[in-house]
Amino acid sequence: MNAPTEPTRKLRVATTSLAGCFGCHMSFLDIDERLFDLLPLIEFDRTPLTDIKHCGPCDIGIVEGGICNAENVHVLREFRANCKVLIAIGACAVTGGLPAQRNHLDLADCLQEVYVTEVSLSKGGIPNDPELPLPLDKVHPIHEVVKVDYFIPGCPPSADAIWKFLTDLIAGRTPKLGHGLISYD
Amino acid sequence: MPEQTELREVLAAIVQRHAGAPTRLLQVLRDVQDVRGWIEPEAIALLGDLLGLPAARVEGVAGFYSFLRTDRPARYHILFSDNITDRMRGNTALLDYLCGKLLVERGHVSEDGLVRVDFTSCTGLCDQGPGLLVNGWAIPNTNIERLDCIAQLVLDQAPVTEWPADLFSIQDNIRRRDILLGHDLQPGDALRAAVARGSESAAEAAANARSWREANIAAPQGPLAVLDEIKRAGLRGRGGAGFTTGLKWEACRNASGPMRYVVCNADEGEPGTFKDRVLLSGYADLVFEGMTVCAYAIGAGQGFLYLRGEYRHLLAPLEETLARRRAAGLLGKDIAGLKGFDFDIQIHLGAGAYVCGEESALIESLEGKRGIPRNRPPYPVTHGYLQRPTTVNNVETFCAAALIAAKGGDWYRVIGTAKSAGTKVLSVSGDCARPGIYEYPFGTPVRQVLADCGAVNTQAVQISGPSGVCIAADEFDRRIAFEDLPTAGAFMVFDQSRDMFQVARNFAHFFAHESCGFCTPCRVGTTMLKATMDKIAAGHGTPYDLAEIEKLDRVLHQSAHCGLGHTACNPTLDTLRRFRPTYEKRLKSLDFEPAFDLDGALARARRMTGRDDAGAHLSTEATE
Amino acid sequence: MSDTQTFLLDGEEIPFAPGQTVIQAALAAGHYIPHLCYHPEFKPHGSCKVCTVKVGNRTAASCTLPAQAGLEVESASDEMNDLRRTLVQMLFAEGNHFCPSCEKSGNCALQALGYDLGVMTAGFRHLFPDRPVDASHPDLLLDFNRCILCELCVRASCEVDGKCVFALSGRGIDKHLIVNAPSGRLEDTDVALTDKAVQVCPVGVILKKRVGFAQPIGARRYDASPISAQALADAPRAPAGDGRCAACEEAEEK
């Protein structure tokens, strides 16, 4: 194992899932017992694990999922404003991924189909509740909205890939995934 | 199916007119569109059948050239020239005005199939712009009055052939003549001199020879003597690249093949260039004479003049000139009375593709294909038209060759500079009192051209069009010459009121529109450059975007397939270097900005939900 | 002693036969140069530009660059690999490449090249073009979203199958693959499952129906070893076509 030496201060890490499926977070947890090696080095800020609602100043921000609605934009901006290093993790954050496959459809047609035409869902028409984030006309990878420092592709990236990437990063090496770890699917 | 039978008859007649030759596919498609208003799907299948080609190949060619329409028929296709000089003369507002009058949306065929209005790349009327094309026929000096007239003619459905002639009246605007534009040759003079030169030089050689063995008086001496004069003149190609003409002709002459070809590149597509239009309208005999001299020197039997589609109005007069020359024994069999000197010229009309100005793409187009530049080597001099030896030269080069054939290489060589012999014909446009055609000896400083054309408060000059170089005021002492400012002839003047960023952005759009799409770097890179320039124009640019432009430039220079891609970022880089503040003042911030309009991307959802609350909007700046 | 001519590739001597291009000689000699539209069975046409190398101060696509004695070719440099990465990124940004839902994943040359070059993101804005699929044919699916315009199917159909089922239309960023049928649908062409054109697609455009995802992850072609390790095994293949099409290039034959 490639355990990094302990830094003087714990690195603060925030993670979030935007237009994603939390699969990348699951894969992150798949590093299993290696979490114990990681925990002396990092502490979590906003993540789905801590349930902290807003991101404070952090060293590393890890973003899963693409940008499909206004709320995604707000969260992504919050991460970018607070994280020294921003990492796009997974196919959706890197390329738009599965949600971006709606991009060749007209958004109005989508809403119409889902909320009006489709009988089982059509009660009440297209919702206009201000609490609901409005969808963007297309789904975008996050690097089209903010500056992104690193990318870990994969659907999801394997636990080994995430481990290799994070340990490289924490140890101050430029992260490099070789054959078998870099994957787009 | 009577309609199908009728279509087949129409197409068969057109194909017949072109001798059923697949090499004439582009000409056939042009004719079909003239008759039908578009290239309909049924026509594509039938043409494949009639020409013995896969229908997909016919469709591929039809889909390549921007003047060929495969979407919907329109009785009138009206295209506004969209060079920066046309923009400066208000073409955008004029286009909107005409669309308003005709109740059409730009780029769409009207509901009744009557008319379609759109932009097109520079049509070569920059000295009398804005230019436009109606079904391919050029109209200069577009203004409100003329558009009123055009709109009425369209609504009255008057055939374009019956429109008032003065709409189509195009001026030569020759402002300065030198040896070429002021020549005094009669048709046939240069040719007769060329043929005679052989015997003269042979006689001279014989007179100086110490023995008969050293005096080679064999028949090929004539063509070789002409070649020698061209080399002695130091003539270099006038299309911009400046390859030595004598070497090109010699290589072609020495290449073996069942037939050799002479091709005149009159696909003058570089925005801001229109000197070939004037040479072809006022000096056609000299052009053809030069081509025939070339044929004599290299032993070619067939010539082509590749005329850009925008110059369709020149086709009929050029055909008349050819007919006159045939009648005078200057084309056809036994030219100038020389037994076995057989040569004729066919005119091939383009259909809106700048890339066909690249010589190997031009040859592909001549062969009836998509205009994709070939891999080189081999070069056209050995593997050109139909893979046979072919000499491709610019219109102006052939004119100069005719002069040299008549008056000799030594006479020519002393004009201009040591490395750039002769004169250059410039197409001057933009912010000046007297736009038009100016011929100067090589070595003339930019400053003198500016003075002569009446340019004041000049901020910049774009030399040789978008693929050339943009120079600022501190460089106006630089000279028009291969060793300093090589040029294909465009000379666009921008005064202090002009925004050089918008000039570069116009050129970025041009390259993206004209990229043939063959290679990855150009196909995608020109698209990315255009998008980045539009982002900066919309006020969302950042230093990241400037860095991306520099990266694109590097990639295009390193890996693009042809000159179009290599030079596509030049106008942007040139203006970034010389007019950086015009970019910087547009930059939104030092921070990253989204690649697209975030709030605009919510508009559709707002409309569908009827929401307009604060949460239904996104600020462009990140405020979190 | 031999009179075999050689050139230098990254400092190593590469022998070549007359008529070979730099990439052909390099692959035959066991030296990999990254490439995409080049295929050992077809005449190189040089459109993807991934195989670009440096020769002196100039750059050229090594698949179309004729080998010459004494050339000093630089390929495995940071500069050339940076360029290749950018070109691969451009291809990813241009089309709709959703690897997780693509049945060619694991067997795709574009993806494998991305892995090998360390492409972590398309970098550029994604163009997300609208390219409908053609599922008309009973046995074949055409998913144009993944087309990288390498023209291998075009070349194979013309030169090997003699059918010209595929061709290109449009220009610039609108360039696209078309099929040879008035309807524009694959079912109306004479394509056959045994056609070379059907087998040659390096990405997931031309797919046989009902055999998707047949190999589990781990057993796919590029799971085992990177494309750079596999390309060499392909290199010494005999050409399948002569670079000409009797139907399309009839003009030249006259």
Image (cartoon, coloured by chain):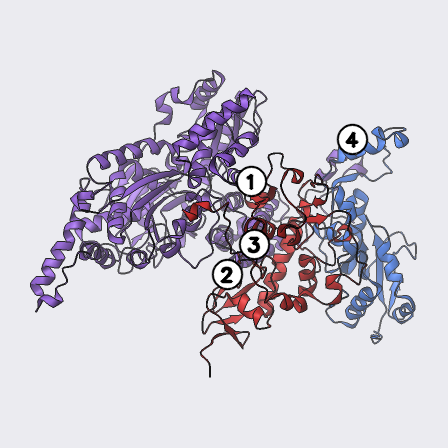
Q: Colour of chain B?
A: purple
Q: Kindly report the distance in space between the C-alpha atoms of the residues bearing marks 3 and 4.
A: 39 Å
* Disc ID at residue B56: 1
Q: Between tags 1 and 4, which lies in front?
A: 1
Q: Colour of chain A?
A: blue
- Residue corresponding to mark 4: B608
Graded by Cα atoms within 10 Å as few (under 14), some (14 to 19) or many (20 or more), the crowding at tag 3 reads: many
- Residue corresponding to mark 2: C64
- Residue corresponding to mark 3: B521
**Chain letter for mark 2:** C
Front in this rendered view, residue C86 or B193: B193
Q: What amino acid is labelled 2 in the image?
A: Thr
Front in this rendered view, residue B172 or A180: A180
Q: Earlier in the sequence, mark 3 or mark 4?
A: 3
Q: Earlier in the sequence, mark 1 or mark 4?
A: 1
**Chain letter for mark 4:** B
Q: Is residue B501 left or right of residue C139?
A: left
